[in-house]
Image: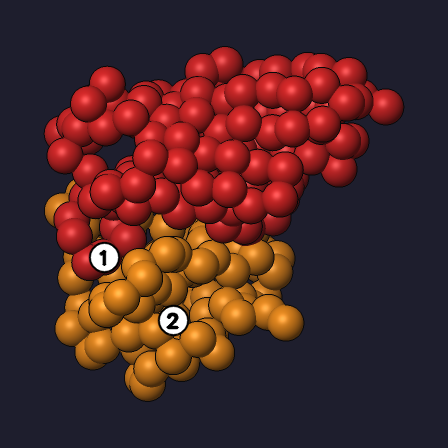
Amino acid sequence: DAMVIQNPRYQVTQFGKPVTLSCSQTLNHNVMYWYQQKSSQAPKLLFHYYDKDFNNEADTPDNFQSRRPNTSFCFLDIRSPGLGDAAMYLCATSSITGYTEAFFGQGTRLTVV
Amino acid sequence: KQEVTQIPAALSVPEGENLVLNCSFTDSAIYNLQWFRQDPGKGLTSLLLIQSSQREQTSGRLNASLDKSSGRSTLYIAASQPGDSATYLCAVPLSPGFQKLVFGTGTRLLVSP
């Protein structure tokens, strides 16, 4: 049973057209993360939510925003996608207490045309 | 700044071989280390998490060891199978409690029948 679900699996967007990627979880974890993985590169952390507390990484471009309306859902908004934003976007969750293993979704492959 | 390196970048073995994947990190003050598997175009599947107080963890044919003092972890795969073909990534968190992970660039494994 999928525990971290990302939709859609594949997203094609036009240059400059806002796009939203979705992540949901059934683990009831209080922390959710968004990572960006470009081709043949390691995943790179963009930001994370601890409950409703948003934490941006210092080098994450302003073009990337996130929303977490409740414990189960988290969204990644790219306000004006550029060609360089084409990547796999990975959502992950973990619990702040006890066992802190990270669980990832299947990813959303974003293509910018 | 924590840096994670994985050697080799690629590995090709015949089915049935036992193999070792290596992961090195520059800052030995880690909280845990997590090994992942990534199939082409897919998300990350967690394989093993080793807490900083542990020396090794086992799951089926997989055994991961951790030597904090030397900044190294190894993933041992016994009796490799074609289905083990994937990219294997190791990662360490930047801070306690959160899995804000710094990843290695991975080892691409191909197991031939």
Label 1's element? strand
Quadrant of residue A29 in the image? bottom left
Camera-nearest residue between A26 and A81 = A26
Is B62 on the left-hand or right-hand side of B29? right
Amino acid type indicated by mark 1: Phe
Q: In the rendered view, would you say B50 is above or below A42?
A: below
The colour with which the image depicts chain B is: red
Residue A75 marker: 2
Residue B27 drawn at (x, y percent): 16, 27
Disc 1 target residue = B98
Which three-letter amino acid code belongs to the residue tagged 2?
Answer: Phe
User: Residue B53 at what x, y percent from top left?
Assistant: 24, 42
Q: CA distance from mark 2 to mark 1?
A: 19 Å
Same chain, labels 2 and 1: no
Identify the element where label 2 is drawn. strand
Q: Which chain is orange?
A: A
